[in-house]
Image (tube, grey):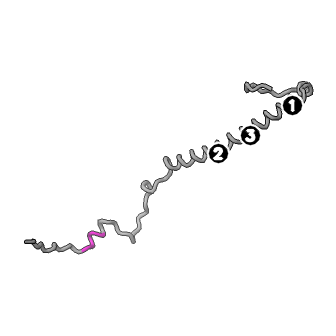
Amino acid sequence: MNSTGSARILTADEAAALAPAQVVELSRELVTTNEQLAAMQEQLAGLQHQLDWFKRQVFGQKSEKRIVSGDDAQMSLGELFATLPEAEEAPSSEVA
């Protein structure tokens, strides 16, 4: 009918007065519009999925930010070095 985007619902009398060719054209436009709507809905779902992923990357919990509970069985690096015996200095050998 018109492709300016100002579609309106026809009354019963207006619809009855349409020529068969107009009905066919309106049916084709409806099918095209429904296909476009389905494609846009699919695109929207994909973009929403991407947005959710980016939000998790930016605002989600990071391993560096997690508070690690103190495990008494696990030594810290400082404690590990404190338990090691002092290393003896290796004898220096001069090459002649």
Relative to residue 14, is residue 47 depicted above or below? Answer: below
In magenta, the rendered stretch is 80-84
Residue closest to the far left: 96
Q: Label 1 sits on what residue type?
A: Val
Q: Identify the residue at image location x=29%, y=65%.
A: 78
Instruction: Give residue 1's position: percent from left, percent from top.
Output: 80, 26
Q: Label 2 sits on what residue type?
A: Ala
Q: Reading the chain from its start, which is encountered first: label 2 or label 3?
A: 3
User: Which circle marks residue 88 in the picture?
Assistant: none
Q: Label 3 sits on what residue type?
A: Glu
Residue 63 versus residue 45: which sits nearer the camera? Answer: 45
Instruction: Categorize mark 1 by other alpha carbons within 10 Å: few (<14), some (14-19), many (20+).
Output: some
Instruction: Give residue 55's position: percent from left, percent from top.
Output: 53, 46
Q: Identify the residue at image location x=89%, y=28%.
A: 15
- Work out how far the residue at label 3 is from the one at label 1, CA to CA, in angstroms: 18 Å
Instruction: Categorize mark 3 by other alpha carbons within 10 Å: few (<14), some (14-19), many (20+).
Output: few
Instruction: Categorize mark 2 by other alpha carbons within 10 Å: few (<14), some (14-19), many (20+).
Output: few
User: Which residue is tagged 1?
Assistant: 23
Q: Identify the residue at image location x=73%, y=27%.
A: 5
Instruction: Give residue 72's position: percent from left, percent from top.
Output: 39, 69
Question: In this rendering, would 36 be left or right of 73?
Answer: right
User: Which circle marks residue 45 in the picture?
Assistant: 2
The answer to whether the residues at label 2 and label 3 have Cβ atoms under 8 Å apart is no
The image quarter containing residue 70 is bottom left
Q: Reading the chain from its start, which is encountered first: label 3 or label 1?
A: 1
- Work out how far the residue at label 2 is from the one at label 3, CA to CA, in angstroms: 15 Å
User: Which residue is tagged 3?
Assistant: 35
Q: Helix, strand or loop at disc 2?
A: helix
Q: Helix, strand or loop at disc 3?
A: helix
